[in-house]
Amino acid sequence: MPSGLIEPEFDRLVFIVVDALRNDFVLGDNSGFEFVRSQIEKGSAIPFTAKVTAPTVTMPRIKAMTTGTVPSFLDAILNIAESDTSSSLLHHDNWVYQFKNTGNKTLHFFGDDTWIRLFPDLFNKKDGTTSFYVSDYTEVDVNVTRHIASDFAEMDWNAIVLHYLGLDHIGHLQGPASPLMRPKQKEMDEAVEMIYNIVEKQDAERIIQDVEIKFMEIEELRRPFRTKVVELREDRSS
């Protein structure tokens, strides 16, 4: 790590965006996020509600989340231009670029392809889904979740970004009170739980491996001293 930088508390990051996720979808009485709520209740997760200003379409909000800047309405216009490349954030200060280039980290992305337009050539693995087929609220999320079991298990990543669109699409089609809303919330909750379980198991295995490696290193350091003690004892006996 370059000198002057603070040593990070964690060495991996999973950044999940569930598009149009209102706080009452998680914290309300009819929430489908049972696992997430259980983590909040036992203090393992911290809820935070962010209040945003217009425009609230995808591209400006991703820019705000990654750069900390206030988006403009020009960004809202560029949001609908799928061929647009002028909105790239490669030359703007943002945490995605900083994370990637501090120690040459490995980043994967799966989900809304707006991220791929904003951060071209930054992701080692990527699989984008278009946000403009609003009638699709199933495959657009299945195409993200299918990467969890395979790509998370490979342990070749430092950060993975996921962006789910299905809940937002249901909101556009039928509104927040749609009968499809709670099942979609449960689907998102199950995806979060699946990721949590995989990463938790990996971290436990990594801790055991680290302890074993340190034990072996200590044994290697102690070996010359043992040899010396044996030699001394042999000298005294002679």
Image (spheres, helix red, strand yellow):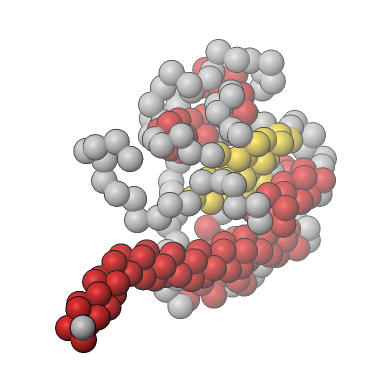
| Residue at 77% in and 45% down | 143
Q: Which residue in the rendered view is the most extreme toward the left?
A: 236
> How many numbered callouts?
0
Query: Is 136 in front, or is 7?
Result: 7
The image quarter in which residue 161 lies: top right
Left or right: 47 in relation to 180: left
Identify whether 140 is placed above or below 214. Answer: above
Above or below residue 111? Residue 227 is below
Where does the image place residue 88, in percent across and percent down from the top left?
53, 20
In percent of the image, x 62 and y 64: which residue is there?
Answer: 198
User: Could you tell me which quadrant the C terminus lies in?
Assistant: bottom left
In the rendered image, residue 237, in percent from the top left (x then y), is placed at: 21, 86
Residue 120 visible in the picture? yes
- Horizontal relation, residue 96 to residue 69: left or right: right
Q: Quadrant of residue 128?
A: top right
Q: Which residue corresponds to the image point at 74% horizontal and 32% vertical from the top-left?
A: 130
- Compared with 41, 58 (above or below) is above
Residue 53 visible? The answer is: no
* 5 w.r.t. 77: above or below: below
Q: Is residue 172 left or right of residue 109?
A: right
Q: Identify the image quadrant of residue 160.
A: top right
Identity of the residue drawn at 29% across and 67% down: 224
State the quadrant of the N terminus: top left
Q: x%, y% of residue 124?
A: 61, 34
- Residue ranking furthest to the bottom: 237
